[in-house]
Image: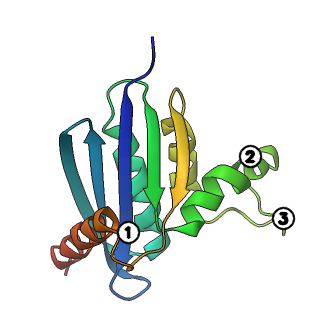
Amino acid sequence: MPLPHVTIYTDGACSGNPGPGGWGVLLRFGSREKELSGGAGDTTNNRMELTAALEALRALTKPCQIDFYTDSEYLKNGITRWMSVWKREGWKTSAKQPVKNQDLWQALDEAVQGHQISWHWVRGHTGQRENERVDQLARNAIGSQK
């Protein structure tokens, strides 16, 4: 039995870096859509990008086949290229320093289990409709943190 297909778009934003931040998510399952957003008072853009991805995956109630779209190279490269090395090296970078945002990376490592995910990078702020939509959700969430 094939897994249900979900398309996910995420974005994170920060007003100052660090500063108040927000994240936005769009989940699409067939013709149904769900938006999620939230924020934090003192955070970084990278933490908001990771939080958006984590909250998107946590919203799924069963294993899915996912097309995951992000404008964050940090998120895409971290999850597809760097994480396996960090795990093998005890969550240390190649410079033997602790991985930044390790708590969120470890939570993401758990959240991806059971899913079949194709990660896609999209250039931000270029008019891609869903990316603009999650960017607006993230920016609106910043306002609730100020």
Give the x, y percent position of residue 59: 30, 39
What residue is shown at x 74% (from left), y 52% (from top)? Answer: 86
- Going from N to C along the chain, the mark reached first, 2 or 3, is 2
- Going from N to C along the chain, the mark reached first, 1 or 2, is 1
Query: Image height check: is 143 above or below 119?
Result: below
Disc 1 and disc 2: Cα gap in Å?
A: 23 Å
The circle drawn on residue 84 is 2
Query: Image height check: is 20 above or below 48?
Result: below
Residue at which label 3 appears = 94
What residue is shown at x 19% (from left), y 39% (from top)? Answer: 31
Q: Secondary structure at mark 1?
A: strand
Residue flagged by tag 2: what amino acid is it?
Ser
Residue flagged by tag 3: what amino acid is it?
Ser
The circle drawn on residue 12 is 1
For marks 1 and 3, give the one nearer the viewer: 1
Q: Secondary structure at mark 3?
A: loop
